[in-house]
Image (cartoon, rainbow, N blue to C red):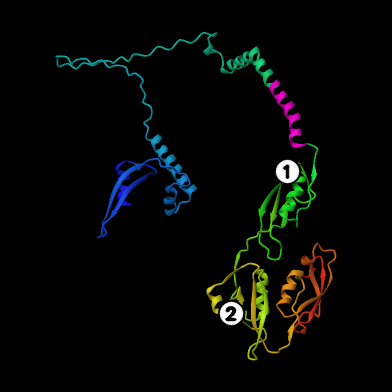
């Protein structure tokens, strides 16, 4: 940096520059700088290296440019202040030099300074004698009374009127003024279905990829803009948000403090990961439903594996091995506020089965209906293999969070 600074100072660089150089590093630690060229006005596009160097010095791009402008203004101010004031070139009357006399008597002389004659005053009808505002008024009057001025005004007004008439007749045809299409509801349609409906109505579809939902079909429309039942013009672009088909990888929570199956699976619910109990091992020393380990795609995952970090695609299913202290009975899970599709997965993991399903006739599909009651209720012990009666409704219960 010292060598490059010296090169810039030697060349008289002001402001900023880019110096290209080779740096040779010797084995003993010495460095030799070979300057190639000095770019006194390097580019400052986003891709140039000058912004990277400014960032190392702590400048954002706009701060760096502001510093350059400030430097330029300060340098300009200094240059202006160094300019000498105008010199007064008023003629000085010459002084007559009289040679000294050859006598010893003193002689005094009076220097005569010539005076400049006063300039003659202009006559009353001369332009310089007329006030400036009168000259301006006369020029304006002559301009307005000129026929050339009025011809140009006529052409301008006529052109504006013609443009207005053309625009008024063409714009309604282009925008289909007075014609409107009531926008259908594309939500819960697939992108293919929505495209067919839109094309039939003369509309364009723009698809935006939305989140992934393991419990709903990929490509399903979940949001539209403008909203359904809005009045739009033909050939209007409608923006649809559809569920993604690519499941993100989700890190699994640790078992520390979460060895209880019910506690751990509540965290899996929030991550939209499915689960079930595939094996119960009798262990009277541990609490009921203590997680021993679980499997993902036949891969055994232990507490030690989770400490190192394990990720699975969202929507994957985990098979748990838990402890049991009393064989033959399991607790009815809490299914309230769950959708029916979620309830089926939860029940399948408890060695119970879903029995009779009541309600939700008004729902679009039984899978999206919500559970508001089960018989037996949550927490009741049932024998392995027994069924649970599920009551559904089309909307989520009011007290659900």
The residue that mark 1 highlights is: 236
Based on the picture, tell me whether residue 134 belongs to the magenta stretch. no
Position of residue 389 measured from the top left corner of the image (x, y, whole percent): 82, 76
Report whether 105 appears left or right of 259: left
Residue 279 appears in the picture as rendered: yes
Instruction: Please name the residue shown 66% across and 15% down the image.
Output: 151
Quadrant, the C terminus: bottom right
Instruction: Please name the residue shown 41% across and 42% down the image.
Output: 42
Position of residue 32 measured from the top left corner of the image (x, y, whole percent): 27, 52
The residue that mark 2 highlights is: 256
Query: Real-space Cα distance between discs 2 and 1?
Result: 55 Å
**Judging from the image, what secondary structure is the residue with disc 2 in?**
loop
Query: Image height check: is 204 above or below 164?
Result: below
How many numbered marks does the figure carry? 2
Magenta span: chief secondary structure: helix
Report whether 122 appears left or right of 284: left
Position of residue 298 measured from the top left corner of the image (x, y, whole percent): 60, 75
Report whether 276 appears left or right of 97: right
Badge 2 local density, few (<14 within 10 Å), some, or many (20+)?
Answer: few
Instruction: Please name the residue shown 79% across and 64% down the image.
Output: 365
Res. 210 image quadrant: bottom right
From which residue to which does the magenta span run?
158-176
Position of residue 11 measured from the top left corner of the image (x, y, whole percent): 31, 41
């Amino acid at each position: 940096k010292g060598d490059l600074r010296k090169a810039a100072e030697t060349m008289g660089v002001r402001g900023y520059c880019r110096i290209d150089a080779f740096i040779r590093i010797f084995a003993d630690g010495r460095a030799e700088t070979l300057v190639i060229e000095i770019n006194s006005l390097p580019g400052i596009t986003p891709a140039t290296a000058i912004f990277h160097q400014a960032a190392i010095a702590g400048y954002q791009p706009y701060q760096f440019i502001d510093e350059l402008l400030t430097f330029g203004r300060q340098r300009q101010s200094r240059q202006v202040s160094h300019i000498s004031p105008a010199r007064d070139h008023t003629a000085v009357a010459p002084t007559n030099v009289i040679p000294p006399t050859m006598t010893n008597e003193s002689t005094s002389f009076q220097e005569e300074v010539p005076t400049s004659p006063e300039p003659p005053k202009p006559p009353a009808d001369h332009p310089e004698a007329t006030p400036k505002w009168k000259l301006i008024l006369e020029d304006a009057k002559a301009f307005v009374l000129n026929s050339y001025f009025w011809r140009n005004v006529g052409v301008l007004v006529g052109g504006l009127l013609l443009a207005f008439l053309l625009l008024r007749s063409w714009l309604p045809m282009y925008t289909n003024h007075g014609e409107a299409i009531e926008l259908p509801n594309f939500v819960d349609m697939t992108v293919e279905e929505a495209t067919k409906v839109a094309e039939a109505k003369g509309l364009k579809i723009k698809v935006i990829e939305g989140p992934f939902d393991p419990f709903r079909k990929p490509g399903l429309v979940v949001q539209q803009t403008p909203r359904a039942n809005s009045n739009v013009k033909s050939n209007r672009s409608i923006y649809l948000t559809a569920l993604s088909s690519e499941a993100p990888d989700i890190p699994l929570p640790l078992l520390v403090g979460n060895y209880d199956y019910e506690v751990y699976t509540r965290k899996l619910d929030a991550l939209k990961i499915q689960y079930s109990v595939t094996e119960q091992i009798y262990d009277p020393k541990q609490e009921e439903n203590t997680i021993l380990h679980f499997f993902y795609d036949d891969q055994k995952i232990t507490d030690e594996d989770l400490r190192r970090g394990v990720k699975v695609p969202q929507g994957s299913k985990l098979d748990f091995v838990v402890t049991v202290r009393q064989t033959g009975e399991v607790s009815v899970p809490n299914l309230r506020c769950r959708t029916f599709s979620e309830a089926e997965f939860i029940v399948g993991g408890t060695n119970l089965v879903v029995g009779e399903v009541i309600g939700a006739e008004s729902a679009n599909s039984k899978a999206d209906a919500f559970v508001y009651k089960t018989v037996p209720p949550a927490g009741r012990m049932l024998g392995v293999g027994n069924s649970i009666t599920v009551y559904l409704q089309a909307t989520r219960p009011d007290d659900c969070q």
